[in-house]
Amino acid sequence: MTEAKRATKADLKRIGNIIANYREQRWGLIPLLHEIQRVQGYIPPEAIPRIARGLGLFPSQVQGVISFYTQFYTTQRGRNIVRVCRGTACHVRGGKTILKLVKQHLGLEEDETTPDLEYTLETVACIGVCALAPNIVINRDTHGHMNPKKVARLFSKKDKA
Ligand code: FES
């Protein structure tokens, strides 16, 4: 698992410039968070008090919005997001074993990211293709009828690295 990366001075300066465009514009919190995440890849927790000051909000208000919307992240994520389905159909068809194998291949627990920022592992509720259970989604691609061999094939490059 990656140690939580701390924002550098350069990161905070870049974020400060973005905040300056929204000064005292409370309505701008969500677009501002999107912009920071687009530029940084996540919203560094150290930036939260600065965002709050810039917009005239309390840090708890900023934190509340970040926590409410699942599209905001306060830790760095991998270039490839691996989601293992935990829905009922996938579960009864071996989803638990698939998750265990993916964890072993990536060396990750849920919501962790590899140190090289290549992969982040998450679980999701039903993704709507139960007929293909058990399923894994990597970025936008769904991989159905997963089994141990398929898991090994999907992540074999990672194992050799
Ligand atoms: S339960 Fe996994 S796709 Fe529906």
Image: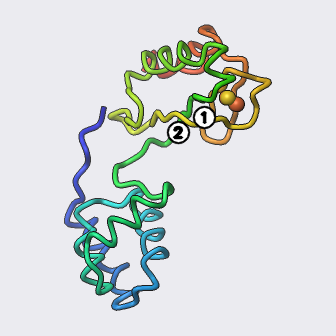
State the residue in front, 160 or 71.
71
Identify the image quadrant of residue 131.
top right
User: Is the C-beta separation of discs 1 and 2 under 8 Å?
Assistant: yes
Report if the beta carbon of the residue with label 2 is closer than 8 angstroms to ligand 1: no
What residue appears at the point 49 percent right and 54 percent down from the top-left corner? 70
Up the image or down, 91 lies above or below 83; here it is above
Which quadrant holds the C terminus? Answer: top left
Q: Nearer the viewer, residue 87 or 139?
A: 87
Q: Locate residue 35, reporting x and y percent.
A: 46, 71
Q: Residue 151 at what x, y percent from top left?
A: 59, 16
Characterize the local packing of mark 2: few (<14), some (14-19) or many (20 or more) Cα atoms within 10 angstroms: some
Residue 18 in the image: x percent, y percent? 37, 78
Q: Secondary structure at mark 2?
A: strand
122 above or below 63? above
Which amino acid, by three-letter code, is at mark 1? Ile
What's the amino acid at mark 2?
Answer: Ile
Mark closest to the chain's N terminus, 1 or 2: 2
Quarter for ligand 1? top right
> Residue at label 1?
138
Q: Which residue is mark 2?
A: 81
Give the side of residue 94 with respect to residue 31, left or right: right
User: Most extreme residue toward the right, as rendered?
Assistant: 131
